Amino acid sequence: MKFFGAALAFAVVAFAADPPSFEYDKKSPLDSQEHEVSVRNGVRVAMLEYANSAAGRVDAMLVTPVDLKGRTPAIIWMHSGGYYNQLSDAVLMAHDGAVSLLVNAAGPTGEGAEAFRDSMIATIVAIRRGVDLISARRDIDPKRIAFVGHSFGAMIGAVAGAVDKRFKAAVFEVGLLGMSIHIRTSPHPWAAGIRKDLGDGLEGFLRVIEPVDAGHYVGQLAPTVLLFQSARIDPGVPDKDAQDFFNAASEPKELRWYDTGHDVLDIQAISDRARFLARELGLPTIEPILKAKIGVK
């Protein structure tokens, strides 16, 4: 299932149910396994999987500079459409010295609201386990780790960042306040289809998943530095809902708008992400890398 951005009403208040737990067995082996390695233009890309103590294993991609020097920053990425959608961004940051772990979301293992909720919790734990994996590397500076999440990944990342304070900076692309309000109100065909399929069971479904809504957590991200990237031509995230997500967040934060769609592939947005990450993680050479990418001498 793909997760798309959506319109959300601004309702960041107490939990409608008991707050979920995102804890996990930190002593459980990660059992990471790499395969399908490719090296091109100074960047190493490997398919990776590791154990998720919440449920099963995590599919991921590891992107590293071939020539690592000293302890370098790292970035955890999550995209609503899968890790390949952020590969080009990760390669760009690898040219500036950053290691990236691109993580796929956990899918529901059954039908119904509980399975859907549990898959979101498992995804949050998968991100935390990813930080464990990256932090254990001798070439990583654990005090310089960032997160970049797109759509569903932005929502899940807001929760993960609030309960796990190891992110120095975070980028939320086309973010929103929660899946429960997404499904209730989004004009996107995916959400409309869910409403139709659930029928009279809609409210019960939403009550079960609501405790995992990002709106409960996005105000608790400090001191993580935040960049919000929102799209003016997004069919699933109206401007007000993107603004509400930003307004609910803790400081320090910045919001930037782009005349683009849900994928946020505007060249300015890509450059802004790279510059923000480079600045917050202490990567010094992003400007000449960006100029070379677009053929500017």
Image: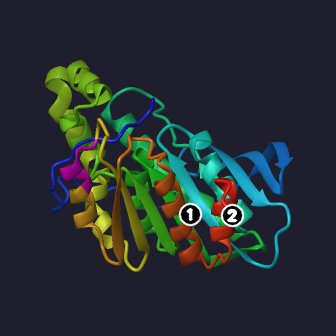
The label on residue 274 is: 1
Q: Position of residue 143 (x, y in %)?
A: 60, 80
Residue depicted at 62% across the width and 40% down the height: 84
Query: Where on the picture, by quarter, is residue 94?
Result: bottom right
Is residue 238 covered in magenta?
yes
Q: Residue at x 76, y 59 (%)?
A: 64
| Identity, as a three-letter code, of the amino acid under mark 2 | Ile
Indicate the quadrant containing the C terminus: top left, top right, bottom left or bottom right: bottom right
Q: Residues within 10 Å of mark 2 (few under 14, many from 20)?
A: some
* Quadrant housing the N terminus: top left
Amino acid found under the numbered disc labelled 1: Ala
Q: Name which of mark 2 and mark 1 comes first in the sequence.
A: 1
Residue positioned 31% across, 64% down in the render:
217
Q: Secondary structure at mark 2?
A: helix
- Magenta span: 237-242
When the figure is inspected, residue 19 is found, relative to residue 237, above or below; the finding is below
* Label 1 residue SS: helix
Residue under pointer 2: 289
Q: Nearer the viewer, residue 160 or 141?
A: 141
Q: Are marks 2 and 1 in contact (CB under 8 Å)?
A: yes
Q: Position of residue 127 (x, y in %)?
A: 54, 56
The span from disc 2 to disc 1 (Cα, nearest Å) is 10 Å
- Which quadrant of the view contains residue 214? bottom left
| Scheme of image coloration | rainbow
